[in-house]
Amino acid sequence: MRSGLIPSLSRLNWPALILFTLGFWLSGSLLLDGVVIPSLYVSGMMMQSDFASAGYVLFEAFNHLELICAACVFTACLALWSSHSLTQHQERLFVVTAGVLFAIALLYTYGLTPLLSSVGIHLDWLAPTANPFSGSMLTMQLSYWGLEVIKFIAGFSLVRWCYREMMHHT
């Protein structure tokens, strides 16, 4: 049974899987960063005393979805690497870029989101009217946005490379 599984995996269209997964993941990130978060800020919801708890639930769910997407992309890049259908330089770029995306998803899920939420809850507890964009919260927000920029650059680079690879083989 195992020998039958391996040949079928090698016939998968790995660049297409990467394109689909990144399309889903990056469009979700754009929606969250470009629509949901600004809407919450403009409506004043970020100043509510229970926003840190609600924000944690939202971001925790999205971060776990990001982990699944990052794992799919990383696995597909490793499959491309092991198939040797790309040049050695391309293989290295694919794996390193996918590794960066996976590391960002891990940082969000197990580092930044819990830390942002705990600082937000701490601010809520101290003073419900405290400015959520001051001190350590501002540093963490800047870290988040910096990682988002890196994620989009890496993700769109992989999209471009996979698209070229698919067009090259058609």
Image (tube, helix red, strand yellow):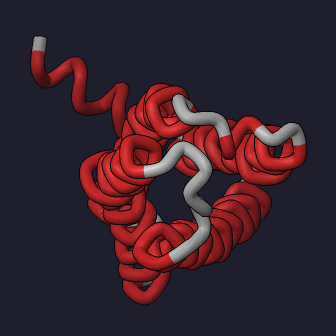
Quarter of the image with the N terminus in it: top left
Q: Examine the rendering and report whether any part of residue 130 can be seen.
A: yes
Query: Residue 49: x percent and y percent?
Result: 55, 35
Point out the residue furthest to the top here: 1
Residue at horizontal 57%, vertical 48%?
18
Residue at horizontal 37%, vertical 76%?
96
Query: Residue 159: x percent and y percent?
Result: 69, 61
Left or right: 160 as drawn, with respect to 132: right
Point out the residue furthest to the left here: 2
> Image height check: is 20 above or below 29?
above
Left or right: 8 as drawn, with respect to 38: left
Q: Examine the rendering and report whether any part of residue 97 can be seen.
A: no
Residue at horizontal 78%, vertical 60%?
167
* Front one among 93 and 40: 40
> Image height check: is 156 above or below 53?
below
> Image height check: is 138 above or below 80?
below
Point out the residue furthest to the bottom here: 89
Q: How many marks?
A: 0
Left or right: 156 as drawn, with respect to 13: right
Query: Residue 24: x percent and y percent?
Result: 68, 37
Residue at horizontal 80%, vertical 41%?
44
> Image height check: is 63 above or below 156?
above
Query: Residue 60: x percent and y percent?
Result: 42, 34
* Front one among 86 and 119: 119
* Front one among 109 and 12: 109
* Front one among 19 and 40: 40
